[in-house]
Image (tube, rainbow, N blue to C red):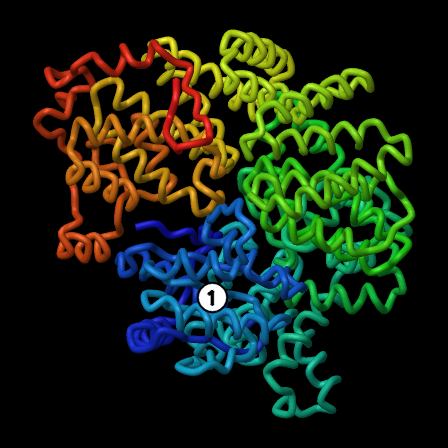
Amino acid sequence: MRSHLPAELNRFVGRDRDLARLDRLLTEARMVTVTGVGGVGKSRLALRAAATTAEQERYCDGVRLVELSCLNDPALLDHAVIEALGLTDHTARAPRRLLLDHLGECELLLVVDGFEQIVDACAELVRELLRGCPGLRVLAAGRLPLRIDGERVFALAPMSEEDALLLFTERAAAARAGERPAEGQQAAAAELCRRLDGIPLALELAAGRLGTLSVEQLLKRLDDRFRLLTGGGRGALPRHQTLRTTIGWSHELCTAGQRLLWARLSVFAGTFDLEAVEYICVGSGLPQEQVLDVLGALLDQSLVVREDGPCGVRYRLLDTVREYGAQWLAETGDAERLRRRHRDWFLGLATWCELDWFSPRQGEVATRIEGELPNLRAAMEFSLASPEDAHLAQYLAGTLWFCWVGCGRLAEGRHWLAQVLDASAEHGSSRLKALWVLGYAAVLQGDAVAAIAALQECREEAEARGDRVAAAYAVHRSGCLALVTDDMPRAEELLGAALAGYEEVGELNSNVLMGQVELAMAVGFRGRLDEAVAMCERTVAICDDHGERWARAYAVYVLAYAAWCRGDGDRARALLRETLAVHHAFHDLVGTVLTLEMLALVAVDAGDPVEAAVLQGAAERIWPSVGLPLFGSAYFYAAHVRCEERTRELLGDARYEEHRRRGARIDADAAVERALGHGRGTGGVRELAPAREARAARAGQAGDDQPHEGSGHDGSGHEGPGRTGSGQAEARRLPLRAERGDGGLKR
């Protein structure tokens, strides 16, 4: 079962009764919300309960976490859930529709955390998902309930005295290199836990001070703070004030530099790295050479959390700590300057990433940009808030084209591009870039009307301004639209003109190389296969010189197609597997599904019609997330039709449909694993989740992975006696072409 929950950074302590109660609620209701004051441990309890259900494999489709604390724009809520579910969708359909379609047949626990700032939008989304997806359960954690029908609210109380002391003792040992409070300090520690009302975050902050203060000193200082706030009586202080008092007390104990850095770190959304901190947070009172030491001190005090991940060491502030820092930053009058420095840093980062996308660091860029998306969104929001900065939002949305297109985020990209283009800005070059990127995204989504409008506006404005670079991009993407809509003569004309324009201005990057591949496709579809191969071989050579992988994968796809046309199925398969691995790594569904379709054709010609049918079914499942199957293009569709006809001929209609349906129950990750040869027949291929597989079996749709008599495959990976050899002979008569008219294929 698949679960995608963050690993616990330290041991979960206590809360046995709360876990048992929450577990019962999850079995009784489809919607449970854990509420409570900040710092009481709502998120930690919900994640621990979710992890337990994942370990017990209660939900066939696993457990997913949606973290919303850094999301302020309700319009991005659906995109955040799509991202958490690991979905990639290139179509223009509404994100809500995608969620309903995907979750409609799932049995899944969705954990929603940190939704307070967008509670109304979150409640509407959860209500609709629960109504439309009967196998979905939702566990939410926030400071207030969602207030929807069927919701069971679990008001989380602070820890019991016993659990609180256990937590404090364990965290104190961590702060003091394993040294626990001495025997004589136990009474003081217990009293401290009572004074802190058993609130876990308050306990952790207090324990973080034990590197410099004793338990008795902690207790005295806190006692003095409480008496000051309440005029001597402790009982008047409510629990939500206890945490704020503890944070404020911790703030007072910080040095001036630590307070300053704490406040300035609040401008980050999500996680951040040291390099960003050293640029954004320096200034009066905090020179750059002190930043590392001050950050380390905040880490020691549990005010900053360290996270290790694919991007290396990163840091974050807990929500309550960030809120306190943001309020203090606002009081200093320095918030505007810090947010502007934050925006400028991430503008620079996006610019660097765009340049480095055309380099051996392409994979690193994809990982980095994924981790920085919350901060990049915040930078766009900040720029859109001021009319004089709107052009910077346009520049940022356009510069991130490689994220929207190359990393499977077309839907979110179109959201931002539409927003920034609605803003008026005087800087024409930024707007022109946003326009052609919008046109590019619309082409890939199959939205020809939006694509034509954006690209025509870009071209006319670029020509009026004398911007030859933007004009070349507009012409290029218009040629791409002609390619996927079967106007091959126009595609060849426009793509050739765009490449000439790029050469004139000295433009060379992944987009330019993709233009060469697209021109090769158009030329190949017009029957000049040798010319197409020569173009793609030149493209591969340039990509190799620069370490480029994304555009190279498309060029290799064309070379694989040519190898198949020439009857070299082994070379075609090897090339297709090479390109599939790259497309999948970049979450590029267009390249992934095109390659799966071609691998199916190679399989049937190699005498394995069962595998061909399964792969066609797997591709069929992915196409709705891309758009019209094979773009609705007769040229691109020709190989699919050829494969289906040949497979039906070898298997018969009934067995073809059986194996195609089986393939349609394999998710994209498992389909790629299978096609790469890593999971077939080993149990490593994830098909239907167990409960849905049982339902399918009862409906007579279940299949198996075993070869059938006459399938042309003996199960060993070699051709069997069923191989007739006719597939290879037919392949030699290619290239394939499809012509409009009677709907039939012509060679």
Looking at the image, can residue 165 be seen? Answer: no
Q: Is residue 537 above or below residue 251?
A: above
Measuring from the top left, give residue 209's x and y in whole percent.
64, 61
Task: From the viewer's perspective, tell me whether residue 611 is left or right of residue 563.
Answer: left
Residue corresponding to mark 1 = 167
Task: From the viewer's perspective, tell me whether residue 379 is left or right of residue 44.
Answer: right
Q: Quadrant of residue 504?
A: top right
Q: Residue at horizontal 36%, vertical 61%?
A: 104
- The outermost residue toward the left is 709
Foreground of the two, 298 or 549: 549
Q: Residue at horizontal 30%, vertical 77%?
A: 28
Q: Residue at horizontal 43%, vertical 27%?
A: 580
Task: From the viewer's perspective, tell me whether residue 319 is left or right of residue 420.
Answer: left
Q: Quadrant of residue 604?
A: top left
Amino acid of disc 1? Leu
All told, the count of numbered labels is 1
Measuring from the top left, give residue 311's x and y in whole percent.
59, 38
Measuring from the top left, give residue 631's x and y in whole percent.
49, 38
Q: Quadrant of residue 206?
A: bottom right
Could you classify mark 1 by the number of other residues whose Cα lies within 10 Å: few (under 14), some (14-19), or many (20 or more)? many
Kind of element beneath mark 1: helix
Task: From the viewer's perspective, tell me whether residue 429 is left or right of residue 715.
Answer: right
Q: Quadrant of the C terminus?
A: top left
Q: Residue at horizontal 19%, vertical 28%?
A: 649
Q: Is residue 662 above or below residue 201?
A: above
Looking at the image, can residue 169 be seen? Answer: yes
Foreground of the two, 45 or 533: 533
Measuring from the top left, give residue 348's x and y in whole percent.
78, 38
